[in-house]
Image (tube, rainbow, N blue to C red):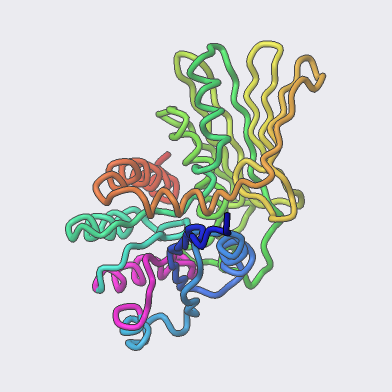
């Protein structure tokens, strides 16, 4: 019997990449956004536009005519976030605005409502909300009582020339690390926060504290600028302590580790080696329809900004 001349079927798999353009080519873009996207097999960078070029007409002509961009990330200084977003709205571009969305509630709310009216998706980029940590934390507090949540996000003082430590509306720790803890507070279902703010005799806030209670447990969070680094969340339930390291952000060279202790003895350790919370956020944004994005994110965003405004007006 001779050999069969039939050829084995050949399958060609076409991988369609999602194209992202970034407006802003500073520290955050190069330290966090670009490395995260470069490690992904679903997303790729179409173009990075520096903040000095974003207002030029040819940038927006490029995004309309030549670009394959599916959505844009705004990573400029916060004082121009909403201005850039409104320019992108004019060309109907879906947009993620890196935190903080803006510098006050009025401009944030106006921008979100303008996008919503035209049916163009937009949301604030708080990537830690898309890490598996959040689901674990919610399950723990939903299935237990008398728990205690303690969390801190404190970073070394930024350099003097940094906008975070200037006498400007975008300066201060609340728009840098504080917004993470405020988001965490509301995400875990707490309301009616008690706030404490310190400025260390500077023209901007340097430390903050947020507290709250419900009928099942309590929350205490601290943020700010100091001479040391802290970034964790722990949930204490009876004899058990559930510890989440790098809860809010993580250097690419470090690992997310969830630990469970009983009377100071380690009982369980789970390492999240390949989790890319930025990509998780982009997946949510890309795959969720516009109405759902507004439904799932807008109320929480405005709740955060209402509190931030009260803090900045010393009405907390």
Relative to the observer, which residue lies in front, 305 or 314? Answer: 305
Left or right of 305 in this view: 13: right
Q: Residue at x 55, y 41 (%)?
A: 131
Residue 270 image offset from top left, x and y in percent: 70, 32
Quadrant in the picture for residue 108: bottom left
Residue 111 image offset from top left, x and y in percent: 28, 60
Q: Which residues are magenta?
A: 63-90
Relative to the observer, which residue lies in front, 73 or 269? Answer: 269
Q: Residue at x 48, y 18 (%)?
A: 142
Relative to the observer, which residue lies in front, 206 or 65? Answer: 65
Say if the magenta span includes residue 82: yes
Relative to the observer, which residue lies in front, 224 or 100? Answer: 100
Q: Is residue 81 above or below residue 304?
A: below
Which quarter of the image is occupied by the C terminus?
top left
Residue at the far right: name it: 265
Say if the magenta span includes residue 273: no
Quadrant in the picture for residue 164: bottom right
Left or right of 45 in this view: 60: left
Quadrant in the picture for residue 282: bottom left
Residue at the far front: name it: 1
Q: Is residue 40 above or below residue 261?
A: below
Question: How many numbered callouts?
Answer: 0
Which quarter of the image is occupied by the N terminus?
bottom right
Q: Residue at x 57, y 58 (%)?
A: 2
Left or right of 41 in this view: 69: left
Residue 90 image offset from top left, x and y in percent: 24, 73
Residue 206 image offset from top left, x and y in percent: 61, 51
Q: Is residue 34 above or below residue 282?
A: below
Left or right of 117 in this view: 295: right
């Amino acid at each position: 019997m001779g050999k069969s001349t039939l050829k084995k079927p050949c399958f060609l798999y076409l991988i369609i990449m999602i194209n992202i353009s970034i407006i802003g080519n500073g520290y955050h873009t190069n330290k966090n956004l670009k490395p995260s996207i470069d490690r992904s097999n679903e997303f790729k960078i179409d173009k990075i536009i520096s903040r000095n070029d974003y207002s030029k007409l040819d940038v927006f002509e490029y995004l309309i005519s030549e670009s394959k961009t599916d959505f844009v990330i705004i990573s400029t200084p916060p004082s121009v976030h909403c201005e850039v977003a409104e320019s992108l709205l004019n060309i109907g571009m879906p947009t993620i605005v890196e935190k903080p969305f803006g510098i006050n509630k009025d401009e944030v709310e106006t921008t979100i409502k303008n996008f919503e009216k035209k049916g163009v998706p937009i949301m604030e980029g708080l990537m830690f909300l898309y890490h598996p940590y959040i689901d674990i934390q919610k399950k723990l507090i939903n299935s237990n009582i008398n728990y205690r949540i303690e969390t801190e996000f404190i970073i070394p003082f930024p350099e003097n020339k940094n906008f975070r430590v200037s006498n400007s509306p975008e300066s201060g720790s609340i728009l840098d690390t504080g917004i993470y803890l405020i988001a965490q507070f509301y995400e875990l279902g707490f309301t009616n926060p008690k706030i404490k703010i310190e400025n260390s005799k500077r023209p901007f806030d340097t430390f903050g504290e947020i507290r709250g209670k419900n009928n099942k447990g309590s929350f205490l969070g601290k943020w700010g600028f100091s001479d040391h680094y802290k970034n964790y969340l722990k949930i204490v339930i009876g004899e058990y302590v559930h510890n989440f390291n790098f809860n809010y952000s993580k250097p690419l060279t470090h690992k997310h580790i969830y630990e469970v202790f009983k009377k100071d003895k380690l009982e369980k350790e789970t390492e999240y080696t390949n989790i890319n919370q930025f990509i998780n956020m982009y997946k949510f944004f890309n795959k969720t329809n516009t109405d759902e994005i507004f439904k799932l994110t807008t109320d929480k965003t405005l709740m955060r900004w209402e509190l931030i405004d009260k803090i900045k007006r010393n009405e907390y």
